[in-house]
Structures are given as structure tokens and as C-alpha cells.
Image: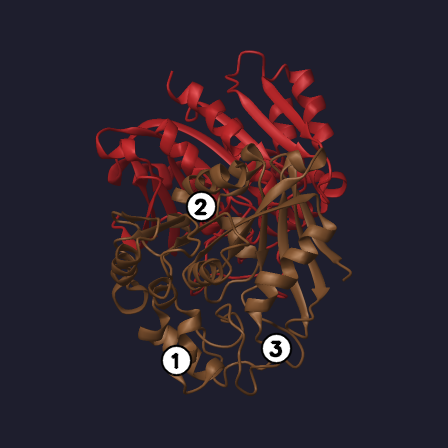
Chain colours: A brown, B red
Amino acid sequence: MTLELVSQNRSFGGWHKQYSHRSESTGCDMRFAVYLPPQAETGKVPVLYWLSGLTCTDENFMQKGGALKVAAKLGIAIVAPDTSPRGQGVPDDEEGAYDFGLGAGFYLNATQEPWSKHYRMFDYVVTELPKLIERHFPVTSKKAISGHSMGGHGAMTVALKSSDQYCSVSAFSPIVNPVNCPWGQKAFLNYLGNDRESWKQYDSCELMSALSPNDKKIPMLVDQGTLDNFLVDQLQTRTLEQCAEVASYPLELRYQEGYDHSYYFIASFIEDHLRFHHQYLMK
Amino acid sequence: MTLELVSQNRSFGGWHKQYSHRSESTGCDMRFAVYLPPQAETGKVPVLYWLSGLTCTDENFMQKGGALKVAAKLGIAIVAPDTSPRGQGVPDDEEGAYDFGLGAGFYLNATQEPWSKHYRMFDYVVTELPKLIERHFPVTSKKAISGHSMGGHGAMTVALKSSDQYCSVSAFSPIVNPVNCPWGQKAFLNYLGNDRESWKQYDSCELMSALSPNDKKIPMLVDQGTLDNFLVDQLQTRTLEQCAEVASYPLELRYQEGYDHSYYFIASFIEDHLRFHHQYLMK
């Protein structure tokens, strides 16, 4: 478990750093970014994990999310993994599609050839990466998770499946019901095969609906822009609304008038998300 | 003078928009970005012009600068032009170098063939673009100007040459003495020719040194990272320090310990720059 420093930048009195390391989960070198706030120089800080959307790497959120200023103020570290395995031997979509293969790992453990060897982002995000972070950086074991679009799907499914590990979860423009949308169906068919029952373990609406009254339900905040091009066909936020109501899930869902799917939207509301997580991370 | 809307994103209650238009100065289509804060929906707002560095377009600052949140709070519009002419018929460096030609207009009016027809960014930034902005958007005539690296050079030379037009000027990591550094010498030799006297009109240190005691001197703020890779060979901030002292120029120069040349540096201190400009824009 050695880390290789790829780059570092002083930022808001703390440090943004990129690292590369050999991953056991994905069987390839993985890159991630970490923001360490100034408070990490004198003590341990909690961590917000951020999962990015289709086509992204560890860089998009750190550069465009506008989160580091607030993280520096609140004393929260941010960790942003890549969105899929990459590098030599890692298969990609045959036609290089943006919504499958490289940059589109969907935060699941693939079961089908040729994907199952490397495409194991669920294990990477939930188990391997936090272990690595807690070993190498001055962080507490308190964790929150958030993400955008495919990464919103990732954050919510991870939090619903592993609710003991996270204090809170949030998402921007998440794919909430992938078993019923084109992006999700394409990915799940390829990564998980024909058995649609197996898809449900990576679907936020299905996972929420399967909760029993006594299951732990961590607080969830979701922001969705009303002018998001993907809202109707891919994101289907209304389905989440209905599932949360039936399951009495502590979901705060906000429709933001006139906002789209871009990082301009994320930056506009990321402070709310960090403050939301902060109250639970500091408990 | 018609504008074509290229894209728009709701951002912090205002709008980020990209436009394309035919430019008389540069003889080609030019793209720029404008951020209109919420206050622009009910009244006129002052404008901060932002000039970007080598290789950038109108997008880098809007996406990575972290400025829009503060602009929305203070009620300042931001206008970010491209860094050079582009498109059909616009010549580029023969080898596609990053530091000359496309993406490297150096905010001057070229006098040499084949550059003099299109590379007229000084006229574009100082005259044509503000006219266009004041005609099409709800802005006052109050203007400030800022920029990064080559754009810091641009902001400072523009403000020193046209001090009647701007309330204040600031820069991150500016090229302060281009006649004496490799980036500047390459660009000026090609754009302006062999006569080194002609270069001085686009050199902040030369312009500052040529001021007479009665010339208008608008307030200037400069931030420079101490771990900037380009500090010693290209930026030469100490020379500016000396010239400002001799000229009694109202320069606030801050060396920021451990910061580099990146947008992580800009984002960390952009709020200070916006508040600096705000006090003069609102006078």
C-alpha cells in the first residue's frame, strides 16, 4: 500500500494532492485526489468522499466544484477517486462510448467478462480507498459521501448498502433508478449480465424500497436542477421522491429552478452540502 | 454588433453565458464569457474584466477561478475574453507552440506580418469589447481589470496605458517585465518586430517607470506565489516591486507562501481581489 505523489498545490491554506497507487480491488494503478484543510496540520479531520460523473476523473470536482474554500473553513478533508479503472489491460467500450467502460465504472463490482477483473469500483470506494486514506493521512474514521450524476448514484447506493460506514450522504443530479434508464441499463447489462434481479443491489430506489423500518437510515440531501437536460430520460428524480416517502427515508430533496447538469450548478450549492455533512461528521 | 449565444448556465442565482460575435478589431469571430450576478436583473452593475493566461480560453477562469460566488454576493459582472484571435485564416505559431500564436495574443496590437491583421487584442479588450458589453448588458461604465500570468501582464499594461478607463487593476502571477523574459521576447519580436523601443509600450515595468508624478495612478493589487515555477525566469516580480517604489505607484504586492502558478492559487485569493475592486467600483 504505497502511494506515489503525482502533484500538489497549496489551496486555501491547505493542500490539494494527487496520488497514484496499485489497487488490489481493480487490479490496476488508480489515481485519486485529496484535499487536506489547514486543520489537518494540527489534528485529525473527517472525510467527505466525492464520486464524479461520466467522463470525469479525480480532477473535475477539485478544480470546478468550488468546495475547497468551504472545506478549509469547516475542517473537512475531501477525497475524490477516479470514475473507473484505467491503464494497461483495462478494457473499454468497443466504440469508446462516453457512458460505458473507461470513465463510467458506475461504482459497482462487475460480474461479467471481460469487465469483472478490473471494474470493481464498489470494493475500491467502500473498502480499499478509505483504508488507504486512514492509513496515510491525518483523518478520523468519520466519513460522508457525495457525488454528481453517475457519482450521485454511486454515493447513494454506497450509503444505502453500507450505512454503518457513513454519517451522511448527498448528491447532485443523481441517477436514482438506473435499472429503468438508458445509461443504467446499458451499464448493468454489460457489467452484471442478463439477470435483472442482480441489478437491484446497485439501484437507489430499489435499495430504499427494500429497507425495513428498523434499518439504519442516514440523512440524505439531493439537489436537482429543473433545467437539467437529463432529468426526464435518465435521472427520474420523482421516482426517488416516491420511494423515500413510502420508506419514510430522511431525504431532503430540493429542485433548483433554472439550474442545469453542469459544475456551475454544483458550485452554486456545494457549500450547503458541506455544511449538511459537517453537522453529522462533527457529532 | 450582434451577439450569438453559445451557452448559458444558471450560477449562484445569476447567469454564466458564452457569446460569439464578429470582431472588427481582430477580423474574426471572437468568443467571450460573461457572468451576470443576480443584481443585474433589477439594475446596472459594474464590470470586472478578466484576462487569462497562455493556452486559456474564456472558460478557464469561469470554471476554475471560484469568483462567481463572490461576484454574486458583491453585485459585480465578470467578462472574460479569449486569449487570442482564432478561427479560419488566423495564423498560428508554425510549430504550434503554447507560448505564441493561438492562445497567446499577449493583449497587444501586432505590427508585423502575418500577425498584424488579426492579433489586435489590445484594441479588442480596451475599446471594442467594453462597448459591446455596455450596449448589450445591464452594466454601468465602471470597470476594473484583472488577470493571470500573460493575462496579468495584459491587465496591468492595459490599466497603465488607459488609466482613465479603469477604477482599479489586479493580477495573479503577472509577467511584469516581458521585454526581459523569454516568453515576452519571443512574442514581442514576432508581433512587434526588431525595434525594442516599440516593445516598451506593452511592458508594465517600463510603463510604470515612464509615468510622471502627475499621471493618474489607479490602485493595483498583485498576488505572487513563492513556489511558482515561472517566478525566476519569466515573472520577475522583484523588478515590479522596484519600479513601483521609484514611481511611488500605489501597488500592494503580496508574496503568498507555498502557492504555485495554478488555478488553485487564483481560487484561494480571488475573493480578496474582488473585494479590492469592489471598493473602487462602488465609489
Three-letter residue code for mark 2: Met
Q: Are marks 2 and 3 on the same chain?
A: no
Q: Position of residue B46 (x, y in %)?
A: 35, 28
Three-letter residue code for mark 3: His
For disc 1, the chain is: A
Q: Residue furthest top?
A: B214
For residue A148, above or below residue B209: below
Front residue of this view, candidates B117 and A75? A75
Badge 3 element: loop
Badge 1 element: helix
**Residue shown at the point (29%, 35%) measured from the top left:** B38
Residue that badge 3 annotates: A118
Front residue of this view, candidates A227 and A127? A127
State which mark lies toward you, 3 or 1: 1
Query: Would you call the spot at circle 2 few (<14 residues within 10 Å), some (14-19), or many (20 or more)?
Result: many
Three-letter residue code for mark 1: Glu
Q: What is the C-alpha distance between the residues marked 3 and 1?
A: 22 Å
Residue that badge 1 annotates: A197
